[in-house]
Amino acid sequence: MANLFEINRAITDAWAACVDPETGEVNDELYAQFEALEMERDAKIDGIACWVKNLTSDAAQLKAEAKAMQERAAAAEKKAESLKGYLAAALNGQKFETPRCVIGWRKSTAVQIAPDADLPAEYLRTKTTVEPDKTAIKAALVAGTAIDGCHLETRNNMTLK
């Protein structure tokens, strides 16, 4: 089957061939070929239009499926975080190892700053908003400097491999 451009060219040629330019008479046999080409053109256009509708429908279904998968992924991530918290509470800092998994703990130190802490300017960094520079505060606290409203807190962070 020819493509739409070829069919259109063939229709133009068939029309020119079936009509006598001097008398304007139409050759019935050649006109039948012209009509057949018109029907082929209509069928081709219908097929392309249906293909577009199918592709549009497929795209909508794929988008819906992608959204559903994203929602499932978010739910799985949330459930995994919840289960990690459950494990952390159950193990309470103990190591655990099997051939399929290893649960260990590492210590980290986090700076806790009271909401009403009056911090010196050297411990503040400016972005679009002013916020405490926890890195500088942590370094000062570790060095022994007392900063009003700030203290170091030791945490146990679970690793799961």
Image (spheres, rainbow, N blue to C red):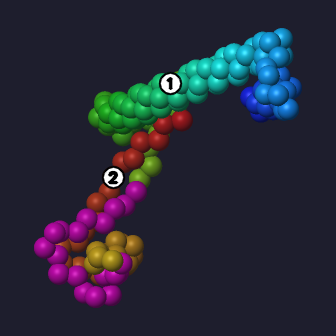
Q: Residue pushed farthest left?
A: 116
How far apart are labels 2 and 1 at the CA level? 52 Å
Q: In what quadrant of the picture does the N terminus appear? A: top right
Is 22 or 94 nearer to us in this picture? 22
Q: Residue at x 25, y 65 (%)?
A: 112
Q: Residue at x 71, y 20 (%)?
A: 38
Is the residue 83 above or below the residue 131 in the image?
Answer: above
Where residue 3 appears, x then y in whole percent?
78, 27
Taking the image as shown, residue 111 lies to the left or right of residue 54, namely left
- Among all residues in the image, which is located at the extreme front? 23
- The residue type indicated by label 1 comes to Ser
Residue carrying label 2: 155
Query: For the view shown, which residue lies furthest in the bottom direction?
Result: 121
Q: Which mark is residue 57?
A: 1
Determine if the magenta segment contains residue 115: yes
Residue 84: x and y in percent read: 37, 34
Q: Residues within 10 Å of mark 2 (few under 14, many from 20)?
A: few
